[in-house]
Amino acid sequence: MKKVKCLVILFCLTFLSVSAQAIEIFPLSEVKPGLIGVGKTVVQGTTVEEFVVEVIGVIPQSPPTPNLIMVRVSGDPIDKSGGIASGMSGSPVYIDGKLLGAIGYGYSYTDHRIGLVTPAEEMLKLLDVLEKDPEPIEQEWQIETRSSEHFIPLEKENIPSEDSFIPLNTPLMIGGISGRSFKYLEKELSQYDFRLIQGLTGSSTSFLDEGIELEPGSAFGVQLLRGDFQATAFGTITYIKDNEFVGFGHPFTHRGDVEFFVTPAVVHYTLAHVEFPIKVASSGPNIGTLYQDRAAGVAGKLNNGPSYVPIFISVEDKDRELVLEYKVEAVKDEAYIHALAISSAFQGIDATLDRIGRGTAEVTVEFVASNLSNTIIRDNMFFSESDIAVWALLDLEQGLDLLLTNRFQEVDLTQINIIVSVENERRTAVVERAIPQKYQVAPGDVVDVEVTIRPHRQEVETLRLQIMIPPETAPGMLTVTVRGGGYGYYYSKPSVHTSLEFLSSEEEIVWEAPSSAENLDKLLEEYMNGERYNELVAEFYPFFDDYDGYFAETENGVMEMELDHNTIPETPEIEEQQFSMLAVEEEQSERGNTWESDDTNYIRVRKRTPYVIEGLATFDLEIITY
């Protein structure tokens, strides 16, 4: 029987394989009750042990699940494990030296010595798919009424009914992610029917000390996440030939064509459990790739790794002068990478701060993709009175949503970087008042606005903004709002309104910026250059006498401003001032240029501050003509 030698030299894993003849298969048609065979698995360590298998009968199934062979297991390994355990999925079973199949299913909360074997004939079909481009597996299903000699009546055997069996429920062992980060990951992955178990795995260094032999019966891991945090499902190799293998005897994710990490595994102990005994194991280095995940089992190749997304997380606790870095690799699967990246960053922040509570966070998120010309970079500042870690993840989550679910094109992520700096100090400021230099202005005028802000428990500060009244603005009253930046932000402070009549308004405003991006590049620009919570924003909605020559209607019917560059005054003393007009070169973002309406165009000026800006103030201008 072929074995694959695993040696680690300078942290590089190399597999040496010896050519082996194809193993002989025990046909399902010859399976009868009473046949005695032998199974192979690892109960502890990496040593493959044998146990006794007795055939009870064949249970017909409906596609895509193949017909299954009911068996009873016994022997010293079974006694030590407490029966068929999670992690024994794929344990090969032989009759007269011929491969019958693999342990794939068991019965929960009952006799753990009774299980179901997935026939080898169906599992080995997965290897045929590895030889060519991935495509659906064509199986010849032969469900027929078998003679009574294949079965012993279940009521006489006092064994569970066939409708109560379940796969060995290959659990996803989570290492390094705990507490609420684990709960988040568990919730996000629940839609894929994963069963997550916390803390029963890790990365083993034993593979760096000595070589191991992988053979049928050896434990191995399939990973969605590896590095400082891990998400690993453990099972057993059923068959290896020319560095190709099959295992599990049932699906893992059942997603068909996949690309997951494959690792060797060491079993520390097998815990007895009333539902299912569980193998506690650790994974080794990446040694191959899982390519097929079907009803009959999983299949892959050794000596080549999958494509993946490296994720780098740096978290600074300024108050303790502590910086910790975390590195993980996530499978490049859109179904899982969002939850894996968020939970990893969440855990990194919680582990570094070692507390839950208030704080101010400066966050930079970077996304690199092979099919995008530029790195996507977004920086922001957040404050939370109760849980700064959650707020610090906002831009990461929004960026992932944009890249993974946008309607324009698939994005091939190749790197994610998250850099977070947190301090306990409250770095916020409230907008107390905004006063224009003059209240009566003419179209084309530039208006200086003096904005008074009060940093938390400090003396007031004064900032200056400049707004320009478009030349074609119609006479009448115009309201200007000065507020903190951010999208969907509920202003916690009452507005302060200063008008010609000194009227006040007590209404709170919810501000949102809809997107009218027509391609992915524009959508990414909106994300990168969108408002930040530490920006001071002045905006207003002018009314125009004549739209001709000033607005152009886009394909979607939105009116967009076309303004001559020369009409915008230079304001070098305000380095980060931005005018949200299409023709203004200083404005790098198109987010918020127009509402999705042909009569609600607004103008916006932005200025960075060292504070998270809260509240708003408004004032009225009277547009007059000379």
Image: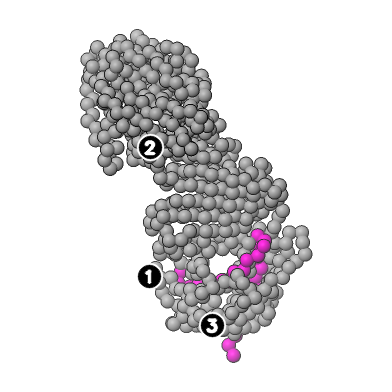
Q: Is residue 489 visible?
A: no
Give x and y (percent) for residue 2.
Answer: 33, 25
Q: Which mark is residue 215?
A: none
Total number of numbered labels? 3
Q: Nearer the viewer, mark 3 or mark 1?
A: 3
Give x and y (percent) for residue 181.
Answer: 57, 40
Q: Nearer the viewer, mark 3 or mark 2?
A: 2
Closest to the observer: 1 or 100? 1
Residue 437 lies in the magenta stretch? no
Q: Secondary structure at mark 2?
A: loop
Give the residue type at disc 3. Answer: Thr
Indicate left or right for 332 with 490 as reference.
Answer: left
**From mark 3 to mark 2, how far is it between C-alphas?**
64 Å
Disc 1: which residue: 555
The residue located at (68%, 79%) in the rendering is 437
Whether residues under marks 1 and 2 lie with C-beta atoms below 8 angstroms apart, the answer is no
Q: Which mark is residue 303?
A: 2
Mark 1 or mark 2: name the one nearer the start of the chain: 2
Which segment did they paint magenta? 597-626
The residue located at (26%, 14%) in the rendering is 32
Quadrant location of residue 465? Answer: bottom right
Give the residue type at disc 1. Answer: Glu
Give x and y (percent) for residue 147.
Answer: 22, 15
Q: Quadrant of the N terminus?
A: top left
Mark 3, other Cα within 10 Å: few <14 / some 14–19 / many ≥20: some
Q: Quadrant of the C terminus?
A: bottom right
The residue located at (38%, 39%) in the rendering is 304
Quadrant location of residue 532? Answer: bottom right
Q: Which mark is residue 567?
A: 3
